[in-house]
Image (spheres, grey):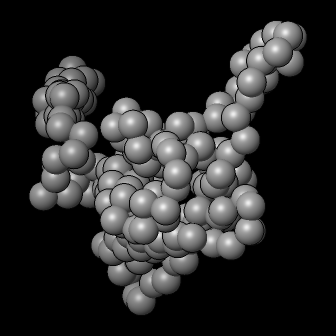
Amino acid sequence: MKHRFTLLAGLTLLVVGCETPATYKDPEGRELVVSLGKVDIQDFANAGNAMLQEMVKSPAFDRADSVPVIQVGQITNDTATNFDLSLLLSKITGPLVNAGRVRLIDSDPVASAARASTQGAAVPVPQYVLRGKILEDRANAGRTKQSSFVFQLALIDVRTSLQVWQGEKIVTKQGTTNAVGF
């Protein structure tokens, strides 16, 4: 009995000793956990940055008479996992607002109520609405699994209802199990 206890204690120490302690990682680095079945933080960063670069290069903002006002419209999550869409939107709208390229109408309920109660508050009318969708496609061959996430965004001119910019970024991950990417 004492031998079994010693063996069990030794195995427990071996398992506990093999665990990796938590450490901080660069959120834009290549040493992050890659989950096959869900969108990871680096997926939002990569898709958002790529779409931001495309949007800034489009002539839509050059045609505006002044700094354009944008309102975020419906962004649909059509994937199997639930996540906060602001993880993607902040990667796009934040740099645009901070660089003075756009002004963003906030649809926060508290801000809307404060505007409504303020006499003579001049609420700008948006020139553009940003809308989008995130789609998912999964496939497997034997033990190999593949997940693709398609990020689609469009910028709509509210005066004409014409789409003035459209972007798409596909993030594909493949493997047999979740891993740490290098």
Question: In this rendering, is residue 163 above or below 52?
Answer: below
Question: Residue shown at 50%/45% (left/top)?
Answer: 66
* Above or below, 14 relative to 28: above
- Left or right of 134 in this view: 43: left
In the picture as drawn, the residue positioned furthest to the bottom comes out as 141
Considering the image in quadrants, where does the C terminus appear? bottom left
Residue situated in front as seen by the camera: 98 or 49: 98
Residue 101 in the image, given as x and y percentages of width and height: 41, 44
Residue 103 versus residue 65 in the image, above or below: above
Which residue occupies the foreground of this view, 78 or 72? 72
Q: Nearer the viewer, residue 22 or 8?
A: 22
* Residue 122: quadrant of the picture: top right
Q: Residue at 18% across / 35% down in the picture? A: 25
Residue at horizontal 33%, vertical 74%?
174
* Residue 137 can be seen in this image: yes
Left or right, 127 with reference to 67: right
Q: Quadrant of the N terminus?
A: top left
Q: Position of residue 97 (x, y in %)?
A: 44, 36
